[in-house]
Amino acid sequence: MAKSTKQTSLPLDLTGEGLTSDQPMSLRVTGGKTARQLTRNQKQFSKLLKEIETLRARQQRTTVAWETFLADYLKRIHPEQQRQHELRKTVLRQLTVHLHTPKGLGPRQRDALADLIESQLEQILNHEPELTDPDLIELIDYFKARAAKQHQDKPAGDDLPPAMLEIISDAGLDRTGFHAGMTEVEFKAELERQFSANPEAFDIDPDDDDFDSPPPPPNPRKRKGKASSAPDPQTQAQQAAESRKRTISVIYKQLAKVLHPDLETDPVKREQKHHLMQELTAAYRQGDLHTLLRLELAWIHREEGDLDRLTDEKLKVYIQLLNEQADELHREINSTAYSPRFAAVSHFASPFTGEPINVGSVMARLHPYTETLKRLEIALQGPAARTELRELIKDFIHQQKAAARFPDFRDFRF
C-alpha cells in the first residue's frame, strides 16, 4: 500500500519570522502510516486542531461584525432614535395639555389618555433614565400619585393581569394575597401560607406518593470486588491544575534546550531563537500553555517531525487542553455581544446566531415610527387637534383590548 500524507491545519507561522495565532500551519502525518493507521488519539488531536482554527476564524468574524454594527449604530441608528426621542417628548407635551383640560372626553377616554401618556413617558425614561426636563419630572410625580390612589381604591388582587387572575382562581387561591410586582420570595411565601392554612381546599393528598416527594435514589449496579467511589470534583480540579503545571514545566524545559540562542552557531538562527526564547519565557511565566504548545508544534515541524514524535500520554494532555480551549472559544463567541464594548447594542443580537441583526432592517422599523410621530406633532397643534386626539385614544383603547387577550406576564414578576 502506498504511503499517504495527511495535512492538518494549525494556527502557526512557519517562516521563522515569528509565530501568530491566525496563520495556518501544516503538520505532516508521515512515519510510514496511512491516514487509516492513525491511532484514535492522533485522529482526535488533528480534529481538535482544525476545530480550534475554525472557531478562531468565527470569533474574529463575530467581533468584526459587532464592531461594524457598533459603527453603523453610532452613525445611523442612534441619531434616528434620538430624533424619535425628541419627537416623543414634543407629542407627550401636546397630549399632557389635554390631560389637564379634558374637554369633550368621557371618563373612559380620559383614563385611556392618561394610560397613553404614561406609556410614552416610560419609553422616554427608558431612553433617558436621568431625565432633567422639569415639566416631565412633574408629570412623573403626577403618575406616581395616580398609581398610589388607584392602588388604594382597588380591592386587593385587582391589579393583577386578567390571565393571572384566572390562573389564581382556577387553583383555588385567594387573590387578595397577591399583587402585581411581587418578588419571587413574596410569591412563594404567599403560596406556602395559603397551602398551610387550608390544604384541604386545594384537593391535594399529602400522603400521595406523587405529591412533593423526591425521586427514589438510583439503584447502583452491584459489582464484584471492591466498591468504587465517585471522584471528588475538588480533588479532580487540583489534580488537573497540578498536571497543567507539570506539562508547562516539561514543555518549557524541552524547548529551552533546543531553542536557547547560546547553543546556536549560525547568526541568523541565533537571532530567530533569541526571539523565540523570549516568547517561550514570557509564556512560561504567564502559565500560557497554548503558546507553549504552538511553539513546540512549530519546532516539531521544523525538525521534520510527525505525530509519531508525540507520545500517547502527551497527546492525551493536548487533547484535554484543546477541548478546554474549544469550550472557551465557544463561550467567548456566544458572549461577544454582551462584552462591555458592545453592551449598549447587545439587544440587537440575533437569538439564533448571536451576531447583530441587519442594520437595514432596524432602520426599516425606525423610519415609519418617526414619520408617525412627525405627523402627530403637526396634527395635534392643527385646527382638528381634538378629532385627532379622539382617533388616537380610540386606537389606543383597541390596542389595550388586544393586549388583554395576550397579556405580558413580565408585568407580574415572580
Image: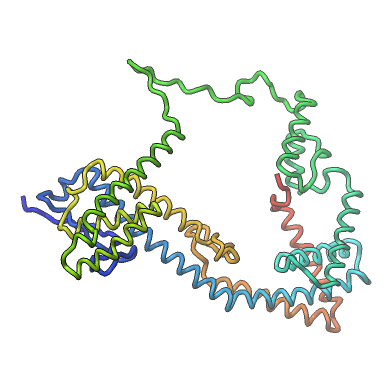
Image quarter (top left, top right, bottom left or bottom right) of the C terminus: top right
Q: Residue at x 26, y 52 (%)?
A: 46
- The one nearer the camera, 213 or 402, is 213
**Left or right: 167 with respect to 366?**
right
Q: Quadrant of residue 26?
A: bottom left
Q: Residue at x 83, y 70 (%)?
A: 136
* Image position, residue 312 (x, y; %): 23, 42
Q: Say if 371 sits above or below 293 in the image.
A: below
Q: How is the image coloured?
A: rainbow
- Quick one: which residue is furthest to the top in this view? 224
Q: Say if 178 sits above or below 218 in the image.
A: below
**Left or right: 54 with respect to 174?**
left
**Left or right: 414 with respect to 224?**
right
Q: How many marks?
A: 0
Q: Quadrant of residue 138?
A: bottom right
- The one nearer the camera, 291 or 157, is 291
Q: Residue at x 77, y 74 (%)?
A: 89
* Image position, residue 142 (x, y; %): 88, 63
* Image position, residue 18 (x, y; %): 29, 67
Q: Say if 11 sits above or below 228 in the image.
A: below
Q: Residue at x 53, y 75 (%)?
A: 71
* Image position, residue 175 (x, y; %): 81, 39
**Left or right: 95 with respect to 225?**
right
- Quick one: which residue is furthest to the left in this view? 1
- The one nearer the camera, 302 or 63, is 302
- The one nearer the camera, 313 or 196, is 313
- Quick one: which residue is furthest to the front in this view? 262
